[in-house]
Image: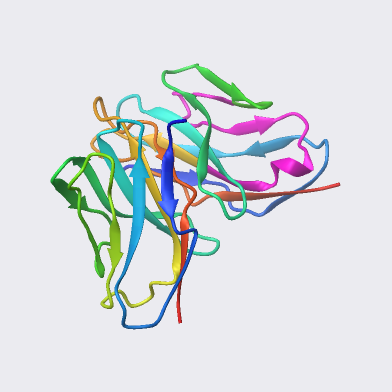
Amino acid sequence: GNSVTQMEGPVTLSEEAFLTINCTYTATGYPSLFWYVQYPGEGLQLLLKATKADDKGSNKGFEATYRKETTSFHLEKGSVQVSDSAVYFCAPSLVGYSTLTFGKGTMLLVSP
Amino acid sequence: DGGITQSPKYLFRKEGQNVTLSCEQNLNHDAMYWYRQDPGQGLRLIYYSQIVNDFQKGDIAEGYSVSREKKESFPLTVTSAQKNPTAFYLCASSIVGGGPREQFFGPGTRLTVL
């Protein structure tokens, strides 16, 4: 069936380290793909998105590329900051569903 | 500014009482959603509505009820039948059409049942 898998956290990094959070999905068709971020005690905010194969979404130094061949949408950032500490959710828009399918979330902790 | 408001931010209730969480949006979105989030957990869909006067159960609707009398409003009632109501509740909205669309979230309501 349709599903989304995110790497488990927490991911613990030092400031200025490189970040990768993996996200893969199983689906038919060409879903739109989203990454959301949730800061402590807040709602979710859209971080970036991609709507077709090979598209690269980017925002605030974060990037993710829509890889149709591997059904993946991994989130990357070249140099993380303490302020990036949050929970990140991958959310594909899967065919046949009425709402986005959210991954379980990956907590990122960045230390100075 | 357009957005989604949820009130209150923190809510305390005694066990056995019903409680209603407010969600209002001025984005002119047709669809609205309620999610529940428990510590260290992802989002679980409670109810959603794609049009006024219509709504569907999500994955964990038992013990909850909703109404959609106005496009802007989608209140959630946590009833005494909900066994573990203490959680963080998130409301969201989106446009409708062409499959699931980008959702915009409110700031959430943290409900604690004593």
- The quarter of the image holding the C terminus of chain B is bottom left
Query: What residue is at 59 percent from the left and 49 percent from the top?
Result: A106
Above or below, B107 against A31 in this view is below
Give how far across and how far down residue B60 sits, in percent. Answer: 29, 62
Q: Nearer the viewer, residue A1 or B95?
A: B95
Give yes or no for residue B106 being in the magenta stretch. Answer: no
Q: Residue furthest front?
A: B1
The image quadrant that residue B4 belongs to is top left
Task: Kindly identify the residue that appears in the image at 76 percent across and 36 percent down.
Answer: A80
- B105 and A30: which is toward the camera: B105
Residue A24 image position (x, y, % from top left): 48, 38
Q: Is residue A53 above or below residue B95?
A: above
Residue A50 makes an appearance in the image: yes
Region rendered in magenta: A64-89
Is residue A1 visible to us here? no
Horizontal arrangement in the rendering, residue A64 relative to residue A27 (left or right): right
**Residue name at image x 61 percent, y 48 percent:** A39
Tell me if residue B40 comes above or below residue A28 in the rendering: below
Quadrant position of residue A60 = top right
Q: Is residue A68 magenta?
A: yes
